[in-house]
Amino acid sequence: MPFFVGGASTFALLGLGVNATITDEDRKESPYWKQFIGPDKLNNVHPTEEQTVASTAIKVSSPEATGLQAYLDANRFSGPLPEAIAKSRFNDLLPAPANPEFKLAVIEFNVPGAANGGTDKGPNGHRIDSIPIANGVIKTGSSCEIIKYYDDKHDEFAAKVTDYDAVIVRINPGQLSQGTLPGTQKRFDDLMDSMISKNKLVWSSPRVQTSMGAKDALCCISGLSCGLVDTMAYYTPEELEAGFKKNCAFQPRVIKQNRGSAGEGIWLCWLQDKDYCKKYGDAYLEDTDVVKLMEMNDNHVEFHTVKEFLNFCVEGPDHPGAGTWNSAFPGKYLEGGREAGGQLVDQRLLPRIAEGEVRVLMVGDVVQMCIHKKPESGLSAVGGMSTYTYFLPGSKEYAGLEANLKKDMPSILKVLNLEGEPLPLLWTADFIPKDAEDGTPGVTEYVVGEFNCSCVGVSKFQAVCGGEKTLADVDDEGYFEACKLTDLMGAKAIDMLKAVKK
């Protein structure tokens, strides 16, 4: 497979049952339209005529106009596509504008030996959402190619990728370490960092992914509206023992490992057969005290002494002092030290987590959707089955959450030591409900339990990945709903580029 995907003559327009009306005013005002049929022919198209995007092309009554496909093949337009065209269905990559304002690329990677190049892809070897994301950029009047990174062709790729003003990295976490040359992930990350040093934009940069994705980001935001004030991180066995014995003696806690994404290594902790102390710091747990533990990946419950739990967290289940564990995962959460992501975060257990979490889907600084995830069983929506309810931005249910997030937005990158970096292009924040910190009755507040900006998927598109289905198999309703997101991504990418290029 070549590095680059493109070439207008190789891409057909497939409009599947979608109708769009282009007015005479659209034709006269649009530089695109003037280039399509020529300014001298505009008067030959009457105001009462409709132009319908149907099976394969736009058909017009004027004999001089030869259809959208002819235009696409000619690859001649400049500037944003008119709305009626931009809202049509495109199952393949649009051609680049003749005079793009900016040049962007979507970067993919195919896992060696994996079917389709990975479970996130279709039979053509591309992520299902890559074409809509790239087209979202192209619709703004900039160009966007889909390019492949190969671990054994790093230098060739590095020489070409600097031609772009910005890149959108769509590589799932861990893929660059599957069947690749040693050091591939670091070489790729270093290349992306070098792009940033040349005043290019990278979504999301290695620093942003690491800092926002790490669990100790929750400590950094503890002073913001979206944070939980009594949040702390442990990087050494001594810090873990001292902090856990003090905190869990006062109230139930949640201990979160830094690795994993499906609830493994996230433990809800309750003191068993012993009362909590009345004032924080008045008591410390003993090694022999018993704690009730629930792991969030499957909600299974275990009972262990404090010492057994600490040994499991540091040394794993095979340590002679760890007792017998039913967890399918190996503990050792501090392994490798801070530089390797070895850490545990300790937060107050919020009992209202049983009501579900609210995932806020963000494009840059814009809320695109709020998704309530209510667990069908157990205490958390992190692992197991959940019921999903979708809310548009501005919904009354989450107006307060959105307002606080907007207030925090200018500070999030600052407290994470990421000033100067752009916000991720597509990211999520999972919020947990709680009673008001000041005790005001009837007030619900929300705090972040996790950020994710590492190749967040577009669910309507990713639903068909991993087998023989392609973008064309996404039904029209799902396609156009998902394109609201990818078109917004394109628009925000250009907005952020304009801001740094001033």
Image (tube, helix red, strand yellow):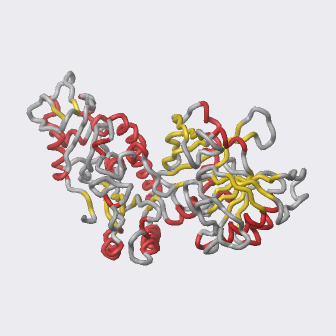
Q: Position of residue 199 (x, y in %)?
A: 44, 66
176 or 442, which is in the foreground?
Answer: 176
Q: Residue at x 33, y 70 (%)?
A: 150
Q: Where is residue 8 in the image (x, y as percent from the top left)?
A: 19, 52
User: Is residue 320 rendered to the left or right of residue 372?
Assistant: right
Residue 418 shows in this picture: no
Q: Residue at x 64, y 56 (%)?
A: 266
State whether residue 275 is above or below residue 342.
Answer: above
Residue 76 shows in this picture: yes
Q: Which residue is drawn at 44% across and 68% down?
A: 192
User: Is residue 266 rendered to the left or right of residue 173?
Assistant: right
Image quadrant holding the N terminus, namely bottom left
Q: Residue at x 44, y 61 (%)?
A: 201
Q: In which quarter of the image is residue 394?
A: top right
State whether residue 336 is above or below residue 430.
Answer: below
| Residue located farthest toward the top when viewing the structure as drawn | 48
| Residue located farthest toward the left when viewing the structure as drawn | 63
Q: Position of residue 403 (x, y in %)?
A: 63, 40
User: Is residue 91 rendered to the left or right of residue 360?
Assistant: left
